Amino acid sequence: MNATVRVSVIALLCLAAAACAKKQEVKPPPPETTPPATTEGAPVAGAFTPADLQTNPCLRTREIYFDFDKSDIKPQFDQIVACHAKYLRDRPMARMTLEGNTDERGTAEYNLGLGERRGNAVASALEADGASADQIKVISYGKERPVCREHNEECWSKNRRVNIVYTTE
């Protein structure tokens, strides 16, 4: 075969391949679906403002409660932590103090340590959601600041908490 015939055959093969490619059905992209409506307490799509600290139900929740002798955040408080992390992301000048508290059982030293571990757990969760470590301060009060002074489980469960306190804007 001479060069002219070879080039002609290659050109015909390319044309045939291009014709076959055009016959393939092109599927349109699936229609976009509307995201579900946000539930009460969920973060808003826009940026938070300082006024939202008083009006947004999620941001108004400032206590994270813990199980006895535990410092891991209960799943029911994940959305609250996410709201506060978003607020800190939206407001880089905002600062907060996380106040770790425990119930009355245990020594003062143990409870100070447990309160600090609880505060650090909330701080870590906030940072994992995008807040800056520079915006967060952790302090432990141990068993020194109870909100309930009765000696029963219902009362003790109210004292096992981290309070979120916004300090400056």
Image (spheres, grey):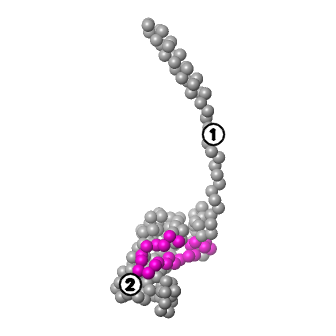
Q: CA distance from mark 2 to mark 1?
A: 61 Å
Q: Is residue 156 above or below residue 97?
A: below
Q: Nearer the viewer, residue 16 or 90?
A: 16
Name of the residue lying farthest toward the top:
2
Taking the spot 47% from the left edge, 92% from the top edge, the residue there is 151
Q: Is residue 70 magenta?
A: yes
Q: Give the residue number, with chain letter if any, for mark 1.
A: 28
Q: Are marks 2 and 1 in contact (CB under 8 Å)?
A: no
Q: Nearer the viewer, residue 120 or 150?
A: 150
Q: Is residue 12 magenta?
A: no
Residue numbers of the magenta segment = 55-76
Quadrant containing the N terminus is: top left
Q: Is residue 165 visible?
A: no
Q: Is residue 48 left or right of residue 2?
A: right
Q: Amino acid at mark 2?
A: Asn
Residue 126: x and y in percent read: 46, 68
Taking the spot 63% from the left edge, 39% from the top edge, the residue there is 28
Residue 98: x and y in percent read: 45, 77
Name of the residue lying farthest toward the left:
109
Task: Indicate which disc residue 111 carries.
Answer: 2
